[in-house]
């Protein structure tokens, strides 16, 4: 049985559903409610598909390239930590991703589904939390179900984007994003230390 709370918090931090709200509002400001719902649904499904690919094939790709998972875990921990630092000290998620907006016709795919929802951090977390040597198939299924739950939360927040944004404003979303970055930094450090311990135990 996986630690559901830990897994949920990890995915919530890397996906950052609240930080997606201002991005969604800005990208869909010229669409009516029906189109906004369609964009939100499509973006969520695409993100789920991308992350499912990393859950299923991420470790297989590493094995095919003869990369030990402990090395990937260390690298993933470092990258997640750097990603967390950008969330804490760099541009907020809304500010950074709104600059990527160039064409509203494909907003559901880019930058909404990738990299706003299925962020690089989420892809790495999907691989690290479904390691075949540490987790059974059933536990990996549980992890993906938790990931889907976070995506459902993201979808619901996009549907409620208008009222939420009026409540917390862009500055509020920025604060939440930075708090999520701090949590993610702790998760990244845990993964880094676990990877180092695993590497030296194998060696």
Image (cartoon, rainbow, N blue to C red):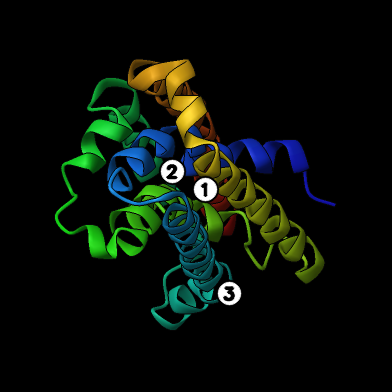
Q: Classify mark 3: helix, strand or loop.
A: helix
Q: Is residue 201 left or right of residue 5?
A: left
Distance from disc 3 to disc 2, alpha carbons, whole Å, reads: 20 Å
Measuring from the top left, give residue 166's x and y in whole percent: 44, 20
**Residue found 58% across the figure and 74% down from its top:** 56
Mark sitting earlier along the chain (1/2): 2
The residue that disc 1 covers is 195
The residue that disc 2 covers is 77
Check residue 56 in the rendering and tell me which mark sits there, or answer none: 3
Looking at the image, the residue that sits furthest to the bottom is: 64
**Residue found 40% across the figure and 22% down from its top:** 178
Q: Is residue 178 above or below residue 45?
A: above
Mark sitting earlier along the chain (3/2): 3
Distance from disc 1 to disc 2, alpha carbons, whole Å, reads: 8 Å
Measuring from the top left, give residue 33's x and y in whole percent: 46, 49
Is there CB contact under 8 Å for labels 1 and 2? yes
Q: Classify mark 2: helix, strand or loop.
A: helix
Measuring from the top left, give residue 191's x and y in whole percent: 53, 42
The residue carrying pointer 2 sits among few (fewer than 14), some (14 to 19) or many (20 or more) residues within 10 Å by Cα, namely many
Q: Is residue 28 above or below residue 66?
A: above
The picture quadrant where one finds residue 156 is top right
Of labels 3 and 2, the one closer to you: 3
Of labels 1 and 2, the one closer to you: 2
Measuring from the top left, give residue 182's x and y in whole percent: 45, 22
Q: Is residue 40 at all visible to an observer of this figure?
A: yes
Q: Is residue 71 at all visible to an observer of this figure?
A: no
């Amino acid at each position: 049985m996986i630690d559901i709370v830990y897994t949920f918090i990890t995915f919530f931090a890397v996906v950052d559903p609240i930080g997606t709200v201002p991005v969604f509002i800005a990208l869909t400001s010229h669409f009516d409610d029906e189109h906004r719902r369609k964009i939100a649904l499509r973006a969520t499904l695409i993100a789920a598909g991308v992350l499912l690919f990393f859950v299923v094939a991420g470790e297989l790709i590493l094995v095919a390239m003869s990369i030990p998972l402990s090395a990937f875990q260390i690298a993933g921990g470092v990258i997640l930590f750097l990603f967390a630092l950008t969330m804490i000290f760099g541009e907020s998620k809304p500010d950074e991703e709104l600059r990527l907006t160039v064409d509203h016709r494909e907003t559901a795919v880019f930058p909404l589904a990738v990299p706003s929802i299925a962020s690089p951090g989420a892809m790495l977390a999907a691989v690290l939390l479904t390691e075949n040597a540490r987790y059974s198939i059933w536990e990996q299924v549980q992890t993906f179900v938790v990931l889907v739950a976070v995506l459902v939360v993201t979808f619901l927040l996009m549907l409620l984007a208008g009222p939420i944004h009026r409540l917390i404003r862009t500055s509020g979303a920025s604060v939440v994003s930075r708090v999520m970055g701090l949590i993610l930094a702790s998760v990244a450090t845990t993964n880094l230390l676990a990877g180092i311990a695993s590497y030296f135990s194998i060696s």
